[in-house]
Image (spheres, grey):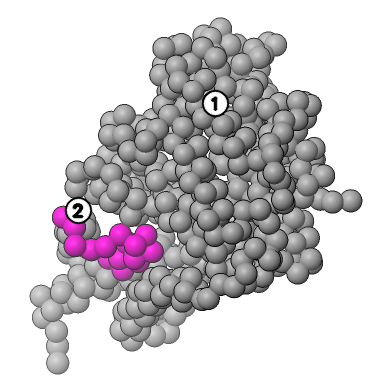
Amino acid sequence: MRLSDSDRFAGRLIILYVLIAVPLCRLLIQHEYGFLYAEVFVLGLLALLPCVAGALIARKPIYFYAIVLFLIVIQSSHSVQVEFFPNVRVRWIILGLMVLTSAIMILMRKRFFPVLLIYLGGMLLADTVQALAVPVQALITHERPTKALGKFQHVVYIIFDELIGLKGFPCDVEGSLKARSDLQQVLLKNNFRVYPFAFSNYRSTRDSIPSILNNHLLKSTGEYLGENAQISGLKKNSLFQQFLNRGYAVRVYQSDLINFAGPGFASVAVRTYKANNLAAMHSIHMDWIQRLRQILTIYLQTDTLCWSTYQALVPARFHPTRYHMGPLAMGDVWPSAILADIKAAQQNTLFFAHLLTPHYPYVYRPDGTVRGLDEWFHDDNLFFYRESEYKYWYWNYMEQVEFLARQLDAFFHELRAAGIYDSTLVVIHGDHGSRLRLLDEGERAARMKLIFESPKCPPASLYDYVSPPKLQDLLNRFSTLLAIKPVGATQPSEVTTKGSVLFFLRGVLWPS
């Protein structure tokens, strides 16, 4: 039977819409967002518009096949790289996908589209089942009977992103002294050994943490990371390997920015939270238009090629802005999930967590309430040239530190109540300082001049300094919290020696 033009149009429209809508549905499922929201309905309608245009334009089969090929390649290149070829450049993956998909389309012809729809439907079903299985598995795990919790010698190792050291807090910023006092009192009350003069060897997470986990100063930036830290993760993690060799289980809580349990750690249980978790928007006041923009932004930016194509085709004024979720995004793991896992552990376990707090945006007030969206600091440029702006955002940062101190106190209280605290080694530190910096216009002009005059020299290698740096600027970048609660500690102590976190941890995590 010969199909009419309207039947062909409907068929083309359905295929194109499924190709666009399925990745969107998968995104919402993976973020545990839900579908019964106005923004999801509107986004579904918006996705229909390019599909209608494509179905109208692609009347000839060759045009329709070309559009389908483009959508398949642009939406699957990132996933193929993540799942199968993490160390292969995306350009080669795109080329391979184009050749392979074109060959399959030519060989299968009209049978290609029913198979494609079945495949996409299967992927959506698999994501749904997996999303439903996670809370069920967590419930089963946490309902296991726990006996003699205190007999285990766990290690709780938490790295707080951008947490400044006790002697790094700037005295001229409002709220600074109170935040430092609150944090210090929590540590001393819980019998920690504090290192007020500890500093990070590096100013970035991707260098600081890998260096510590491998007990080694780096030869070059990113030495232990694969080409894509989110996908391949650390190429080597000596700390995890050491604990596995000692018969410990290892559980990891990390953002999707860096994978700390890379190749070779199949036995390590990893829980990854999304740094820009869409579901976190449900915990704050945002209107549906703001949520729509955030979903659209994450949807477009999930795939590098997709986002690059969008940027090339759409004027800059229509590029959506991403709201960073940071501390809100990690609510799924900190502190409740980590506590539950510690209480349920049935063998000696290393619990390693990298938590995006007090990392920007500065969303929390000291009592744990969340600021309005218009009060957040959204930019990732933390350089300030006006003292008033610098002090204002530092005050916001300090309030988030105060809330973190309250969370830590409650966390330790729960461990005590469960009979775990005394037998547990607890290590907490920051990966580097706050990154909030006050620079003058002269420094900015001189640095930019140096960068432009040395085009072959990447800005990072200039260390941002063209003259001797101010002490507070160094403290903002490198002073970082370090506190250790040894097993059986009965009183607090203070180490006034100046040294790096790596230096101090060698005697604790790397016994000779």
Q: Which amino acid does label 2 sit on?
A: Glu
Does 21 lie within the magenta span? yes
Residue drawn 56% across and 41% down? 160
Mark 2 or mark 1, earlier in chain:
2
- Amino acid type at circle 1 is Arg
Task: Name the dominant secondary structure of the magenta segment.
Answer: helix
Is residue 139 visible from the viewing direction of this image?
A: yes
- Quarter that holds the N terminus: bottom left
Residue, disc 1: 180
- Which range of residues does the magenta coloring cover? 19-39
- Residue at 41% of width from left, 80% of height from top? 106
Q: Is residue 190 magenta?
A: no
What SS does tag 2 mark? helix
> Counting other residues with Cα less than 10 Å from the Cα at mark 2, is it few (<14), some (14-19), or many (20 or more)?
many
Element type where label 1 sits in the image: helix
Residue 71 pos. (x, y %): 36, 64
Locate residue 358, reporting x and y percent.
Answer: 49, 36
Left or right: 207 in relation to 26: right
Mark 1, other Cα within 10 Å: few <14 / some 14–19 / many ≥20:
many
Residue 357 - label = none
Residue 380 versus residue 512 in the image, above or below: above
**Residue 257 appears left or right of 291:** right
Q: Do the residues labelled 2 and 1 touch (CB within 8 Å)?
A: no
**In this view, which residue lies farthest toward the bottom?**
1
